[in-house]
Structures are given as C-alpha cells and as structure tokens.
Amino acid sequence: MKILPIIMITASLAMALSVQAYQEVTSGGLETIRGIAKINETKSAEALKRVIKDKNPIQRNYVHQPPVVPHQTRGYRVNKDSNKCLTCHGWKYARETGATKISLTHFETRDGKTLSDVSPRRYFCSQCHVTQADAPELVDNLFKPVESLGND
Ligand code: HEC
Ligand code: HEC
C-alpha cells in the first residue's frame, strides 16, 4: 500500500503551494492613498489630524456648498432623542449662541413640503457638514472656488 503516503505528500504539497500563492497576492501595481499594500495585508491607519477649533465661519467655495464646520464637534451627540447641533444652530437658540441659523432648506422634505421643524433628511448634520484639519491635499488638483462668493 504505497499509494496512501503518495496521496498525503501530494496533498500537503498542494496546500503549501496554495498558502504561498495566497501570501503573494499583490495589489496588481495599484496604489491607494495609503500607499501600496498587498491585498491580504491591513495597513495601519494614519494618526487622526487635529481638528480646527473655534474659528470664524470659513469661506464657501461654491453655491449650495454645505458650509464646513469651523469648530470641534467631539462629544456632540446626534441621535433619535437629541441633537446637540440644534441646541446652538436651531432658530430657537441661534441668537443667544451666536451660531448661524440652519437655513430654510433644512425644513423642507424631499417632496418640497416645508415642515415646522428640521426635516428628517437634514437631521444628521455631520452627513453633510464636516470638521476641518490643516492638512496637505491627498491628491493634487486644480480646483478653484467661485469668485462670486467673495473668493479671490
Ligand atoms: C455650543 C454651540 C454650538 C454647537 C453645539 C454647535 N455649533 Fe456649529 N457653530 C457655533 C458657532 C457660534 C458658529 C459660528 C462660528 C464661530 O463664531 O465660532 C458655528 C459655526 C458652524 C458652521 C459654519 C456656518 C457658516 O455659516 O459657515 C457649521 C456648518 C456648524 N457650526 C455646524 C455644526 C454641527 C454640524 C454641529 C453638531 C455636530 C454644531 N455645529 C454644533 C456653535 C455651535
Ligand atoms: C443633506 C445635507 C445636509 C444636512 C444633513 C444638513 N445640512 Fe446644513 N446645509 C446643507 C447645505 C447644502 C447648505 C447650504 C445651502 C443651504 O442652505 O441649503 C447648508 C447650510 C447650513 C448652514 C448655513 C445656513 C446659512 O444661512 O447660510 C448651517 C448653519 C447648517 N447648514 C447647519 C446644519 C445643521 C445644524 C444640521 C443638522 C441639524 C444640518 N445643517 C444638516 C446641507 C445639509
């Protein structure tokens, strides 16, 4: 019965080869913003950038741009029970807090109805409004903000 050892050797060889093939999976030459990484390898994420803290409102780049957030938002909860952002940006509080009021579009439903309070589609503020960090561009680009909004 010499056939059994032969089968075993062949099987273990095949396994070893497939493990090697797995380890050699490459990115196919593609480079992501995180650099070249093998598909089966997880690169560690970059350290979090320091978020800009309490600046005046930042110039908008184009019409209908959701303005970017000029302050930190860590710990500002938004869930079905409460919305920290609205405690300053809601019309009820804005005068007192000095925050820009949410605009009328934030009361409109997707069917164009105007509600008496913020519309569900504008409830999760950070879906559109993002904090800023002073960081180099990830990708070179030729973007220029529109002049009509006071940009040079
Ligand atoms: C404690 C009050 C307060 C809270 C809470 C708050 N903000 Fe603000 N926010 C301000 C003030 C005040 C400004 C005006 C800029 C300034 O003077 O710092 C501002 C500015 C902004 C702007 C820029 C508006 C513009 O006209 O350019 C955006 C966008 C914004 N906040 C979004 C948010 C979001 C999203 C949240 C919740 C994650 C939030 N804010 C929570 C007080 C607040
Ligand atoms: C679906 C995207 C979206 C969501 C969600 C959203 N916004 Fe906006 N926001 C915008 C856009 C786009 C603008 C600029 C045009 C406009 O006013 O509609 C804007 C404008 C603003 C402005 C400036 C208003 C002005 O008069 O110039 C403030 C302040 C603001 N949003 C706060 C908030 C807060 C607070 C929330 C959460 C309750 C929120 N937004 C949710 C898209 C969004």
Image (cartoon, rainbow, N blue to C red):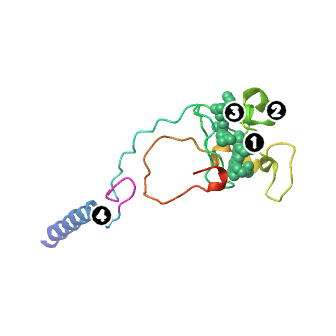
Marks 3/4: CA distance?
Answer: 46 Å
* One can see residue 87 in this view: yes
Tell me the residue at 12%/71% (across/down). 2
Q: CA distance from mark 3 to mark 1?
A: 13 Å
- Residue pointed to by mark 3: 84
Q: Would you name the residue on which mark 2 appears?
A: 92
Vertical comparison of 21 with 47: above or below: below
- In terms of secondary structure, where does tag 2 sit? helix
Indicate if the residue with disc 3 has its beta carbon within 8 Å of ligand 1.
yes
Q: Position of residue 52 (x, y in %)?
A: 53, 35
Q: CA distance from mark 1 to mark 4?
A: 50 Å
Q: Nearer the viewer, mark 3 or mark 4?
A: 3
Q: Earlier in the sequence, mark 3 or mark 1?
A: 3
Residue 77 in sight in this render: no
Q: Amino acid under label 1?
A: Ile
Please state which amino acid type lies under the numbered disc 2. Answer: Lys
Q: Tell me which residue sits at (36%, 51%) in the image.
A: 42
Which labelled disc corresponds to residue 25? 4
